[in-house]
Image (cartoon, helix red, strand yellow):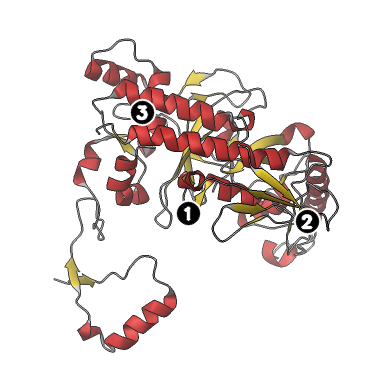
Amino acid sequence: MAKIYYYRLPEFWRKEQKYLFLHIKNNYTNIDWQEITPDKKHTWLTEGLHEEFDDFIPLGTKEAKAQKGITEGVIFKIYGGGVLTSRDAWAYNFNQQALEENMQATITFYNQQIKLWVNKTNKNIKVDDFVIHDDSKISWSRNLKRQLKGGNLAIFHDKKIRKSLYRPFIKTNLFFDRVMNNDVYPMTVIFPTPEAENIVICVTNHSQIPFVVQITNRIPEFAVGGRTTQCFPFYTYNEDGSNRTENITDWALNHWQQHYQDQTISKWDIFYYTYGLLHQPQYREKYAQNLKRELPRLPLTPKFWEFSKAGQQLAELHLNYEQAEPYQLEEIENPKYPYSLEVEKMRLSKDKSQLIYNNFLTLTGIPKPAFDYKLGNRSALEWVIDQYRVKTDKRSGIINNPNRKEDDYILQLIGKVITVSLETVGIVLKLKDLDL
């Protein structure tokens, strides 16, 4: 029988360190290999995995997701990824007018290509050889080529422009459309119309970044947490926005009520319990490797209401971050430059106590604990700094400018996200005292 051996280098070593290690060892026989065997899930690399995680209640399963009537043993019936456009430069923009112009232009070009395809004389030509590859006019993907082959015209309508959460605390405009988005996943039943209200818990499911959980009431982007993200809504709808249905299973409600002997527990309480527990430091640290391999599973902790109430506090804080009271930073103006609140690309000082907002303005007095609220490899504040900058897409030449003329939105947002971060850290610290 074949045997498999494994050796692991430190996770954050740079490639130069790995090359040096191999150079020093010189030969594979000089490495202290470890024989590995798979677990019952056929997982070979099991270091850091905890078997009791399998006994917890899953947020969702593929069986329930497929709507086969199997809802026992799961919390959410429907879940899925955010919108994957495969052409973000075209389909997203901070400026709605720019988005409209970009999408109208690329849709016109796409529909022209369809007409040429339908009327082509060479019936044997492949679509890859037929379409015009011009990055300044369109960004082709495999799915868009399938749409073209099927003769599916794209239609522009301003109602298709929706608000989206692109990255943590980064709201922008999205052109939401089955043809021009590579995949909309279940978002057509989660946010089917602009009027359809919903709240969604989004979690990362990726081996390369720390676990991320965030909540939104806008359409999330596919990698809203930095990598592949799965989204669990409180409601689902028909695609026309009718028939709003609670997405937490009746099984979950009965299970929670019976376990805690408390009939007052509601589905909203379970929803907030989920959000609270997924922020608990011990849970995230202990099951870090499990969370990199599969979707979260929840234990029934001794302190249901404490987790649920903390989850509700966090949810309200994160959903309403734009209404937070801005943290007061000292503003240092540079008289050598004219007054301006527009950003090009913000950057932090080395000690992260100052933010160079632009040539004219520097913000100082950023409290260190603000960086303790992390979503993946970045803090909430660092996500804002990274995303709120002027970007020019190299392929299309499209400019995405977050600035609003005569508007201090970005400046205010910096202070608001600091406030939200500090309050989040305070709530999470209290969660540390709760047993799993």
Local packing at callout 1 (Cα closer than 10 Å; few below 14, some 14-19, many 20+) is some
In the image, residue 307 lies at what x, y percent?
35, 27
Q: Tell me the residue at 49%/49% (across/down).
A: 228
In the image, residue 250 lies at what x, y percent?
35, 19
Q: Earlier in the sequence, mark 1 or mark 2?
A: 1
Regarding residue 101, the answer to whether it shows in the image is yes
Residue identifier under label 3:
75
Label 2 SS: loop
Q: Tell me the residue at 60%/27% (across/down).
A: 239
- Residue that extends furthest to the bottom in the rendered view of this protein: 26
In the image, residue 334 lies at what x, y percent?
78, 55
Regarding residue 85, the answer to whether it shows in the image is no
Answer with left or right where residue 64 lies relative to residue 178: left
Q: Earlier in the sequence, mark 3 or mark 1?
A: 3
Mark closer to the observer (3, 1)? 1
Quadrant location, the N terminus? bottom left
Residue identifier under label 2:
398
Mark closer to the observer (1, 2)? 1
Residue 377: mark:
1
Label 3 SS: loop
Three-letter code for the amino acid on which mark 3 is drawn: Ile
335 relative to 426, above or below: below
In the image, residue 5 lies at what x, y percent?
21, 72
Q: Earlier in the sequence, mark 3 or mark 2?
A: 3
Q: Tell me the residue at 71%/67% (across/down).
A: 129
